[in-house]
Image (tube, grey):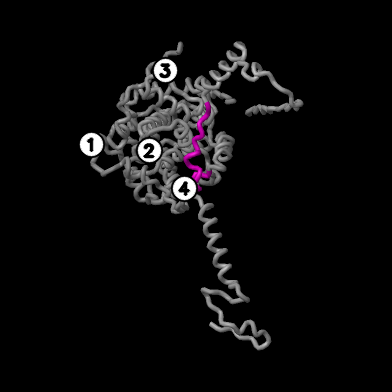
Amino acid sequence: MVITDENNPDLNKPTNLQGGIEMGNRKFGQEIIQNRRALNVINQGLVGGRAYPYVVNKRALSEKHEICGKKQSDPVHRPITRKFAAQIANTQPACPPETKKANQSASNGFGASIFVDEEHNSHKEDQPVPMFLEQTEAMPSETDETEEVEMEDIAEDPFMDIDSCDAKNPLAVVDYIEDLYAYYRKMESFSCVSPNYMAQQCDINERMRSILIDWLIEVHDKFELMNETLFLTVNIIDRFLSQQTVVRKKLQLVGLVAMLLACKYEEVSVPIVGDLILISDKAYTRKEVLDMESLMLNTLQFNMSVPTPYVFMRRFLKAAQSDKTLEQLSFFLIELSFVEYEMLRFPPSLLAAAAIYTAQCTLNGFKQWSKTCEWHTSYSEDKLLDCSRLMVGFHQKAATGKLTGVHRKYSTSKFGYTAKSEPAHFLLDTQL
């Protein structure tokens, strides 16, 4: 390539793309190429790890396929289309609102110490030091004091950095994770309901709510929905019933529409309205489903973004360094708690922490709650005992009675036969 210029004869010299422009005895292009090669070498030394892939799957394969495996027919489960109606029909009617007593319960920062080490450097004149002063050993009292300090440091249980393994994972948002969970803890009170809201209901009671939740857990398992969907479904039901009176024949419709709304919020593939009508044995029409959906959304003011126990479960399980067995047992215990109306008095974060604590005690056979778990949950072992003992009681009677949907669900190979584990009876001893 030749660049010419009548006013500048230097530009008439041939230019080589590889050799550069000849300027005197130097080639300017070669210097640029050499400099670029040098920068490339420097840049290669500064480059970190590989770029993290940005493909996001909403439903994790580990949750969907790893546990489920090959889908097989489950003889343990019974037909659930007519089960709900039969159980509701045998339930005694609710007491009049004037005969019910309302009980109210109220539920209840960190200090940081800064240690500053000051070094005082004394400057002395150079003087000959006797040899015996240079080889002087520490006094016995000083040696003992040093050993005591070292032993205290060794005995201390430091908090583990549970986010260090995700430092290069942008989806883990390590820089913001503490702020996120601080916000969840602040907002969880808005997702809670009064533990005695059933007092305002005239035609339904606590037993009917338990039948509904137990039946929906089976429906959730049949549809193979995500765990987040079940947690949000239960939350929507309680928040709606605490604000709206419902007759008995519409209670099942409330549960189905709550699951439909949770699916639209959490799932990628949402069940159609026709599926919900079939699962209810055609007890409701399509218009009734859509009308109830509109009523529930307006009653809840379209507020679906609430911190359920699920978000705390994931964080606390990470703090506990859980494996699959501990995770499944924790979810088994908290789903047993969903069925029980009395567990509404506990906030979502405490329910999650108590389920993990109870699961650890069940698997290990003794009390276990590390400093790391206590730090990330903000709950000490003493604060978890009341809720944990209730969960142990639910575990003991899970296979008895009429509401055994959770026990049958976790008695399959899909969930590792978790329900067959021995309950932590020693936690029921109040003297421990």
Q: Which residue is denoted by mark 4 in the rendering?
A: 265
Work out whether residue 99 can be spotted: no
For label 2, the SS is: helix
Corner quadrant of residue 332: top left
- Residue drawn at x 39%, y 29% is 333
Q: Which residue is denoted by mark 3 in the rendering?
A: 427
Q: Residues within 10 Å of mark 4 (few under 14, many from 20)?
A: some
Q: Amino acid at mark 2?
A: Leu
Q: Earlier in the sequence, mark 3 or mark 1?
A: 1
Q: Earlier in the sequence, mark 2 or mark 1?
A: 1
Image position of 418 with respect to 305: above or below: above
For label 1, the SS is: loop
Mark 3 or 1: in front is: 3
Mark 2 or 4: in front is: 4
Residue 216: image tag: 2
Mark 3 or 2: in front is: 3
Q: Are marks 2 and 4 in contact (CB under 8 Å)?
A: no
- Residue drawn at x 56%, y 59% is 39
Q: Is residue 282 left or right of residue 378?
A: left
Q: Amino acid at mark 1?
A: Pro
Q: Which residue is denoted by mark 1 in the rendering?
A: 75
The x and y percentages for residue 236 are: 48, 39
Q: Residues within 10 Å of mark 2 (few under 14, many from 20)?
A: many
Q: Which residues are magenta?
A: 158-173
Q: Amino acid at mark 4?
A: Tyr
Q: Report how far apart the C-alphas of labels 2 and 1 lie in the structure.
A: 19 Å
